[in-house]
């Protein structure tokens, strides 16, 4: 990080002006800072600086037991905590060689897909706000709040869910889930439709998003892109299909891909993914209902988790892309090393290449469309 | 043919495999540090391997694993504790390792590649010419462990501030920190 945090302003480098954006600017999503060298309105050089939300999560993990680390994973991508929890639990389960009961896997799928919808709703809502479209934000955020109601009523927390345990889940879906879900589903669809009507064919929206920060598939793979940002570039890759986990191979759903990898394609990919997630939840809930009521929710795991010495990497498709955990055990009750592979980290490092040559206003659009979450970026 | 044999076939003739470990289906290959970039190019360009995606790159500190394990002390009848001599082992493995997680997009296969880094020679060749994705992870490894990457375009601290005096993910760095403070200097 720059030793001197005060930005250089004025004509200090010839004709160019250095502009400091963030870290506490509303358009910079929390704690991201970009130092940009500008030529008039266009960006000559962009230097993102991160670390303002660094809490030492990986170091903390080495001093906690395996179960104590689950609440810490909530604080990575705080817009959708559940995939973080499940990803970590899957890594430890893989290390221990534990097979999770099917009913628990289905509950995980239902909750993870709800979290995916909530995450995409935030992303698109904020993208709209950053580009000056305030109305869709309300349509989407109201429905996100309904999803958070379900989470809250499932285990008492809106954001930091601490969902599941190593070996399964701690609680069954409540009895009136079906009723709540049937109420929620049409409302989510309606909100998405309204958003689509307001944005997709809107002249201003198209001008601000089509062709902005376009990226080729080759570059995206070279930079380690995953998730909606990679699919927007035209690469059909989704861990739910390519490396199925949690019974995802039993559900039928489409993986949307874009073409140009610009802001518009990322928006469209996310919109379609929400619809597909609704379908997945329907199928998962149907399978769930066929299970006997007393089917086990937890695999047989010891009270004190002591995996055998070894190291594994396990990843799943989080709303932002491949979220992986590398867990190394030395045979004791605390992990020896935990490495988190956050999807944003790889995507955000390509930020200079994405926005250089564009306008300052497009930097904001690009940042929102990448859905960079500082919590998992800095860890 | 399974992955292990294919990797051996690819790297074996040049003696590029130091060891191979399989843990719960995850294959990890240790390669010599000096030839890590060549190995990556080989793994990427050999047709039946095709590891064309760098998923992640990070460091591990083996300090605590290298410590001789104390055997549980036995209490004698008088209550006095007798400590047994730790078992003699061979030379300890080098303290640090850098782990590369590779992925083959066509076959969905994953491979861990490892290099071990001695405390006396904390420099590894950079992987940025092969994959641009190695840029920030290498900076983070430098930040957290102090391992330098030779040829990296912009090797400076990523998460901690520039004049932070230590490398926090090392095992001998205390969890509470060492009282470092960041003093903000403002121009008048």
Image (spheres, rainbow, N blue to C red):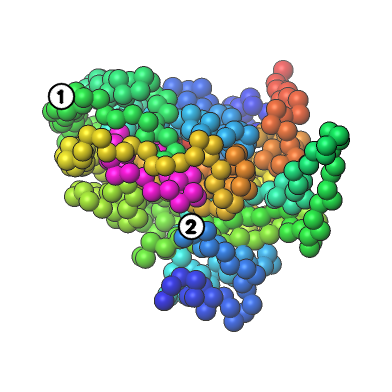
User: Which image quadrant: the C terminus of chain B?
Assistant: top right
Q: Residues within 10 Å of mark 2 (few under 14, many from 20)?
A: few
Q: Residue furthest front?
A: B77
The residue drawn where x is 56% and y is 43% is A306
| Mark 1 Cα shell of 10 Å, populated few (<14), some (14-19), many (≥20) | few
Residue B38 visible in image: yes
Classify residue B66 as left or right of residue A205.
right
Judging depth in this view, the residue of A292 and B6 nearest the camera is A292
Image mark 2: chain: B
Give x and y (percent) for residue A268.
24, 41
From the image, tell me which residue sits under label 1.
A179
Q: Is residue A152 above or below residue B74?
A: above
Q: Which residue is mark 2?
A: B24
Q: Is residue A219 part of the magenta span, yes or no?
A: no
Q: Magenta span covers which residues?
A: A83-112
Q: Is residue A139 left or right of residue B54?
A: left
Q: Chain of mark 1?
A: A
Residue A72 appears at what percent x and percent y? 51, 30
């Amino acid at each position: 990080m720059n030793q001197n945090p005060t930005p250089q302003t004025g004509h200090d480098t010839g004709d160019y002006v250095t502009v400091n954006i963030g870290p506490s600017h509303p358009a910079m999503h929390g704690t991201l800072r970009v130092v940009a060298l500008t030529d008039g309105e266009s960006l000559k050089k962009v230097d993102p600086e991160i670390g303002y939300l660094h809490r030492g999560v990986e170091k903390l993990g080495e001093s906690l037991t395996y179960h104590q680390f689950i609440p810490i994973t909530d604080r990575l991508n705080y817009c959708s905590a559940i995939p973080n929890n499940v990803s970590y639990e899957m890594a430890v389960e893989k290390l221990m060689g534990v097979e999770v009961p099917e009913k628990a896997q289905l509950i995980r799928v239902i909750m993870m897909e709800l979290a995916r919808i909530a995450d995409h709703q935030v992303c698109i809502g904020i993208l709209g706000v950053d580009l000056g479209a305030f109305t869709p934000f309300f349509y989407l955020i109201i429905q996100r709040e309904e999803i958070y109601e379900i989470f809250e009523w499932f285990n008492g927390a809106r954001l930091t869910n601490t969902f599941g345990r190593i070996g399964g889940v701690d609680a069954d879906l409540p009895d009136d889930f079906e009723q709540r879900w049937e109420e929620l589903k049409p409302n989510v669809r309606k909100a998405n439709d309204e958003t689509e009507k307001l944005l997709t064919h809107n002249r201003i929206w198209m001008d601000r998003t089509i062709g902005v920060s376009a990226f080729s598939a080759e570059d995206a793979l070279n930079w380690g892109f995953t998730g909606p940002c990679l699919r927007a570039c035209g690469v059909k890759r989704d861990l739910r299909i390519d490396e199925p986990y949690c019974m995802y191979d039993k559900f039928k759903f489409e993986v949307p891909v874009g073409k140009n990898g610009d802001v518009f394609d990322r928006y469209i990919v996310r919109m379609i993914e929400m619809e597909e997630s609704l379908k997945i939840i329907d199928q998962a809930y149907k399978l769930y209902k066929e299970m006997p009521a007393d089917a086990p929710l937890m695999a047989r795991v010891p009270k004190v988790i002591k995996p055998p010495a070894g190291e594994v990497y396990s990843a799943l498709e989080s709303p932002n892309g491949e979220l992986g955990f590398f867990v190394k055990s030395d045979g004791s009750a605390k992990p020896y090393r935990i490495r988190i592979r956050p999807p944003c980290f790889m995507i955000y490092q390509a930020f200079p290449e994405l926005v250089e040559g564009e306008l300052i206003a497009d930097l904001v659009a690009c940042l929102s469309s990448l859905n960079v979450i500082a919590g998992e970026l800095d860890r | 043919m399974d992955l292990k044999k294919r990797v051996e076939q690819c790297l074996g003739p040049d003696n590029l495999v130091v060891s191979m470990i399989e843990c719960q289906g995850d294959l990890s290959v240790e390669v010599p540090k000096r030839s890590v970039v060549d190995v990556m190019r080989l793994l990427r360009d050999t047709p039946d391997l095709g590891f064309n995606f760098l998923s992640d790159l990070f460091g591990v500190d083996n300090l605590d694993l290298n410590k001789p394990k104390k055997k549980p002390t036995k209490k004698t009848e008088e209550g006095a504790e007798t400590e047994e001599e730790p078992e003699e082992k061979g030379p300890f493995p080098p303290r640090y390792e850098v782990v590369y997680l590779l992925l083959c997009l066509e076959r969905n296969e994953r491979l861990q590649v490892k290099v071990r880094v001695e405390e006396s020679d904390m420099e590894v060749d950079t992987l940025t010419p092969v994959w641009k994705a190695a840029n920030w992870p290498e900076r983070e490894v430098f930040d957290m462990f102090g391992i330098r990457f030779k040829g990296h375009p912009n090797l400076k601290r990523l998460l901690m501030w520039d004049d932070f005096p230590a490398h926090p993910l090392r095992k001998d760095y205390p969890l509470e920190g060492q009282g470092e403070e960041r003093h903000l200097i403002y121009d008048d």
